[in-house]
């Protein structure tokens, strides 16, 4: 149960984000990052799955690094998006080599 009266003390975007993360026990921004990743992949899939994954992973990696610096997400999110980015990059590289 969260205390809605604590919203009166919010005076900026950082305070609002911190309150949302605290009220959900640290899950709010993690869920937002995963949702952004899924929306980007679905939106960009018409360009190919590999390009959609690498674009969405790069965007979410940058977002998660910023959120990590603000202490809104833990280090696992930047690491996971880095692994997705690297895996997709290797897949694209080997796919291009095998096509030659």
Image (cartoon, rainbow, N blue to C red):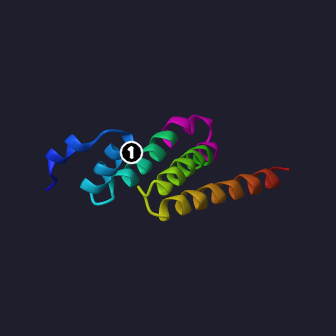
- Residue 89 left/right relative to 67: right
Q: Quadrant of residue 89?
A: bottom right
User: Residue 89 lies in magenta, yes or no?
Assistant: no
The residue lying at 38 percent from left, 45 percent from top is 14
Q: Quadrant of residue 8?
A: top left
Q: Residue at x 60, y 48 (%)?
A: 58
Magenta residues? Answer: 41-52
- Tell me where residue 32 appears, x and y as whole percent: 39, 47
Q: Residue at x 59, y 43 (%)?
A: 52
Q: Is residue 21 above or below residue 10?
A: below
Q: Is 47 in the magenta?
A: yes
Is disc 1 placed on a helix, strand or loop? helix
Q: Position of residue 68 (x, y in %)?
A: 48, 57
Dot 1 crowding, Cα within 10 Å, few <14, some 14–19, many 20+: few
Number of numbered discs overlaid on the protein picture: 1
In the displayed image of the protein, which residue is found farthest to the right? Answer: 100
Pinpoint residue 30: horizontal percent, then vertical percent.
Answer: 40, 54
> Which residue in the structure is indicated by mark 1?
14
Q: Nearer the viewer, residue 4 or 99?
A: 4
Q: Residue at x 64, y 43 (%)?
A: 51
Q: In which quadrant will I find the N terminus?
A: bottom left
Query: Residue 77: x and y, percent?
Result: 49, 59
**Residue nearer the viewer, 62 or 83:** 62
Q: Main secondary structure of the magenta part?
A: helix
């Amino acid at each position: 149960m969260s205390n809605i009266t604590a919203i009166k003390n919010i005076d900026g975007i950082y305070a609002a984000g911190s309150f949302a993360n605290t009220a959900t026990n640290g899950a709010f921004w993690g869920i937002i990052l995963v949702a952004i990743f899924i929306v980007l992949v679905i939106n960009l899939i018409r360009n190919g799955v590999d390009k959609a994954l690498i674009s969405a992973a790069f965007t979410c990696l940058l977002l998660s690094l910023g959120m990590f610096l603000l202490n809104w997400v833990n280090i696992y999110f930047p690491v996971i998006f880095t692994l997705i980015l690297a895996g997709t990059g290797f897949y694209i590289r080997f796919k291009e080599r095998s096509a030659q």
